[in-house]
Structure formats: structure tokens, C-alpha cells
Image (spheres, rainbow, N blue to C red):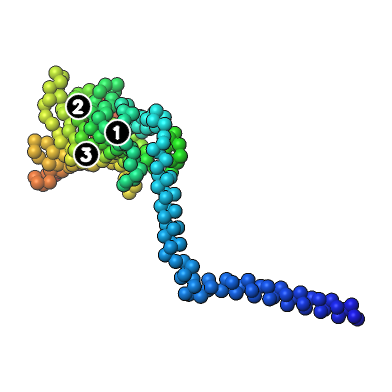
């Protein structure tokens, strides 16, 4: 009986000790549930330090491309451009990197080939890259391409350049061309007329699930817009040309399933 009482007293004392220990520990955490002390814990100083650390880490990550190996970077960009656009760009090793508005590389005074011949000269090309996979130049992914002040030389051998671009996959990136000119030349390489490009864009229309081309142009001081959609399932390219001030719209259907290719034109007033 005495042994029983001993164990009962022992367990009671042990229980009291554990309870008192828990109460002390919980009392130390009570400040988290008191409004004033909780606000003190989350003070401006701590918040500012956390925010500063987050900013430093973010900028450090986005600045990684500064340390890329130049030759590997250029090779990767050229390969992606050729794969996605079937255009061979000549890129200089003199380029700049910027974080804003998105991580991007800027190349100046470049040229590119189409059908193995010089086709255009570009004053400035900006390559926007994905935020992911920035730790290695071999893993970067091009998101958008912006060409500025481009001079295109168009003739009977390469006249289909802008239409053929629609056959590429624009689901992962956009191509934009601004402040540029198309020089239409004859067999003797003489300029017949010049088409001014204010803004041109290739993108994948998620609503229609089709590659789309839209452009604001000017020819003979007459502004007009163009829209092309590539219907790969039907092997047709639908074209709309709008002369707004004339209230004139021309619609074309290019059936490239047939050989030779067949155009169907409709004019709307």
C-alpha cells in the first residue's frame, strides 16, 4: 500500500512539474497574441530588413546574366533565333544587359540573312528572356524579340518573307518590328517604292489558336493596317487590309494547298 502511495505522489509531482514548465513556456509566447506586443515584434525595422533582403536576393538573381560567357550566350541566342524564325542573325559581341522592364539583351547594328543572302540591316535588336533558368547561358529562353529601325530589301526572290514567317511557332514568344522600312526593288536592284512600318507584330492568338500578323504601315503617305492569320488546318492564309480614311477594306485568301498558290480577293466599301 505504501508503494502505491509513493507512486501516486511521484506521478502527481511529475504532473505538476510538467504543467508548470508548460505554463512558463507558453507565457513566453503570450506576447504573440497580444496586439501591442505583436505589432512590436513585426516592427518597421524588421519589415524593412526583410524587404531589403528580398530585393537584394531578387536583383542578385536577375543580375546573373551579366557574368555569362559571351561566346556561349551569343551561340545560344543565334541558335534559338534560327530555330524559331529560320533567320541567320549576325550578332556582335558588344551588347548590353538590362533588368528593366524585363531582363533583356540589346544588340546594335546587326544584319541577318534570308535564303542565304543579306536581307536586312537592324539598328537595334532587343532580346527579352524568361525569368527562369538564369543560372546558365545555355538554359535561357527567349520570350520576346523587338527589332527597331530595320531596313528590308524586298524583291521577287524574297517577297514572301513576311508570309513565310507565319509558319513558325509563335506560341512561346512574340516578334515585334518598329520604326522600319521595306524597300521594294526591281531586278536591277533599283528602289520602286518604300513601305514604312510603324509597328508590326507576330504572335499566337489564343482565342483563334492561330499565328497572327498585324501591322500599321504607310505607303505614299497613305496609312493602312494589315492583318494575316494562318489557318494551318485548311492551309489558308486570310489577309485583311484596311484603308481607314477611305473606308475601304480588302480581304484576300491565299490557298497554299494548291500549286500554284491561289489568291481570292474581295473588296469591301
In depth, the one of 162 and 94 nearer the eye is: 94
* Comes first in the chain, label 3 or label 1: 1
In depth, the one of 184 and 226 nearer the eye is: 184
Among all residues in the image, which is located at the extreme right? Answer: 1
Res. 255 visible in picture: no
Residue 63 at x, y = what percent? 40, 42
Q: Residue at x 29, y 23 (%)?
A: 115
Q: Residue at x 36, y 37 (%)?
A: 169
Secondary element at image label 1: strand
Query: Image quadrant of residue 124?
Result: top left
* Comes first in the chain, label 1 or label 2: 1
Res. 88 visible in picture: yes
- 47 versus 126 height, above or below: below
Please say if the residues under marks 1 and 2 sit with CB atoms less than 8 Å apart: no
- Is disc 3 surrounded by few (<14), some (14 to 19) or many (20+) residues within 10 Å? some
Q: Which mark is residue 107?
A: 1
Q: Residue at x 15, y 43 (%)?
A: 242
In depth, the one of 230 and 169 nearer the eye is: 169
Q: Residue at x 68, y 73 (%)?
A: 21
- 116 versus 5 height, above or below: above
Amino acid at each position: 500500500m505504501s508503494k502505491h502511495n509513493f507512486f501516486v505522489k511521484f506521478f502527481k509531482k511529475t504532473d505538476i512539474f510538467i504543467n508548470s514548465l508548460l505554463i512558463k513556456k507558453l507565457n513566453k509566447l503570450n506576447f504573440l497574441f497580444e496586439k501591442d506586443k505583436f505589432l512590436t515584434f513585426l516592427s518597421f525595422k524588421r519589415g524593412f530588413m526583410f524587404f531589403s533582403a528580398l530585393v537584394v536576393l531578387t536583383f542578385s538573381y536577375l543580375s546573373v546574366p551579366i557574368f555569362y560567357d559571351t561566346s556561349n550566350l551569343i551561340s545560344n541566342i543565334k541558335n534559338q533565333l534560327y530555330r524559331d524564325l529560320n533567320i541567320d542573325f549576325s550578332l556582335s559581341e558588344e551588347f548590353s544587359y538590362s533588368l528593366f522592364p524585363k531582363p533583356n539583351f540589346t544588340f546594335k547594328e546587326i544584319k541577318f540573312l534570308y535564303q542565304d543572302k543579306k536581307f536586312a540591316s537592324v539598328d537595334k535588336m532587343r532580346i527579352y528572356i524568361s525569368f527562369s533558368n538564369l543560372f546558365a547561358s545555355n538554359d535561357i529562353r527567349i520570350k520576346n524579340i523587338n527589332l527597331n529601325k530595320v531596313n528590308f530589301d524586298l524583291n521577287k526572290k524574297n517577297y514572301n518573307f513576311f508570309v513565310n514567317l507565319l509558319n513558325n511557332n509563335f506560341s512561346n514568344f512574340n516578334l515585334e518590328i518598329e520604326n522600319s522600312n521595306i524597300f521594294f526593288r526591281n531586278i536591277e536592284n533599283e528602289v520602286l517604292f518604300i513601305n514604312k512600318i510603324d509597328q508590326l507584330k507576330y504572335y499566337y492568338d489564343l482565342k483563334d489558336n492561330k499565328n497572327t500578323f498585324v501591322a500599321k504601315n504607310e505607303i505614299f503617305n497613305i496609312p493602312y493596317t494589315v492583318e494575316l492569320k494562318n489557318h494551318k488546318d485548311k492551309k489558308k492564309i486570310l489577309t485583311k487590309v484596311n484603308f481607314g480614311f477611305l473606308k475601304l477594306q480588302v480581304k484576300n485568301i491565299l490557298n497554299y494547298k494548291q500549286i500554284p498558290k491561289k489568291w481570292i480577293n474581295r473588296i469591301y466599301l
